[in-house]
Image: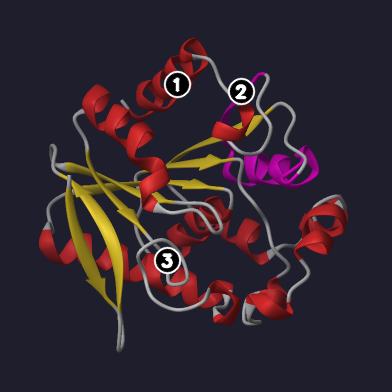
Amino acid sequence: MNKITIPCIGYEIAADWYEGNDNVLLVLPGFTSSKKNYTELVSAIVEKTGTSALVIDYSGHGESPFDIQDITIAENFSEVVRAYDWIKEKYPERTIDVVGTSYGGFFAAMLPSVREIRKMILRVPANYDPKDLHTPWRKLDREQIRNEYRADPKNFTNHPVLAEAAHFRGDAYVLTHEFDESCPKTSTDPFVSAFNAETWEAKGFIHGFMKSNPTTEQIEEYQNKLAEWLE
């Protein structure tokens, strides 16, 4: 694994590059998480599938600059697009898959509307009110988003990100956690329907993977589910 940077306008974001075969898995972490927290999972997927992988730290996260409270959801998504374009510029012949967790799952679901994706994995995907995408995080109420917005299925009937899914021509996989209260089924089921996705529910898990205190066997099963679907 090599540490690299992805150029944006006036700044760079940090990333980890895993060299493998002619497929690239773009890995999008969760909110306030970092690429460092994905080392074990990504290393296992790379070993099991042979894929290359790029894991990014959005601005306000990990080794990238700025305070997350000053960043908007839209700004972080623009960095996802720049990371995709970095792959295409460096490796134009390679196919690109994407896996996004929670906050990153929302970005993964948005990406096919602007770039070509072969396979997409949404791990406990979060969803957000379109009116909040351009508002700095310091002005957003995370409790309201989790406990009210995502709990009301009416919010996803005409959601623009889900509407764009009709144009996706790749394969989608939605992975949920049995006891997830941050991204309940009222907000994850619409992703399944919109993308006509295959699904798997990880039994015994809350929203946070490591906060679920998984056993060695559970971790292995989880890694295998992702790797087998990608293959």
Separation (CA) of disc 1 from disc 3: 26 Å
Q: Which quadrant would the N terminus be assigned to in this image?
A: top left
Residues at marks 2 and 1 touching, judged by CB atoms closer than 8 Å: yes
* Mark linked to residue 225: 1
Q: Is residue 132 left or right of residue 22?
A: right
Considering the numbered disc 1 on the image, is that residue within a helix, a strand or a loop? helix
Kind of residue sitting beneath label 3: Tyr
Q: Which residue is mark 3?
A: 58
Residue lying at the far top of the rendered structure: 217
Q: Is residue 172 magenta?
A: no
Q: Residues within 10 Å of mark 1 (few under 14, many from 20)?
A: some
Q: Which residue is mark 2?
A: 202
Residue 2: x percent and y percent?
15, 51
Q: Disc 3 or 2, which lies upstream in sequence? A: 3
Residue 202: x percent and y percent?
61, 23
Q: Is residue 134 left or right of residue 78?
A: right
Q: Disc 2 or 1, which lies upstream in sequence? A: 2
Residue depicted at 25% across the width and 53% down the height? 16
- Mark 1 or mark 3, which is nearer to you? 3
Q: Which quadrant would the C terminus be assigned to in this image?
A: top left
Kind of residue sitting beneath label 2: Ala
Residues at marks 3 and 2 touching, judged by CB atoms closer than 8 Å: no
Residue 224: x percent and y percent?
40, 19
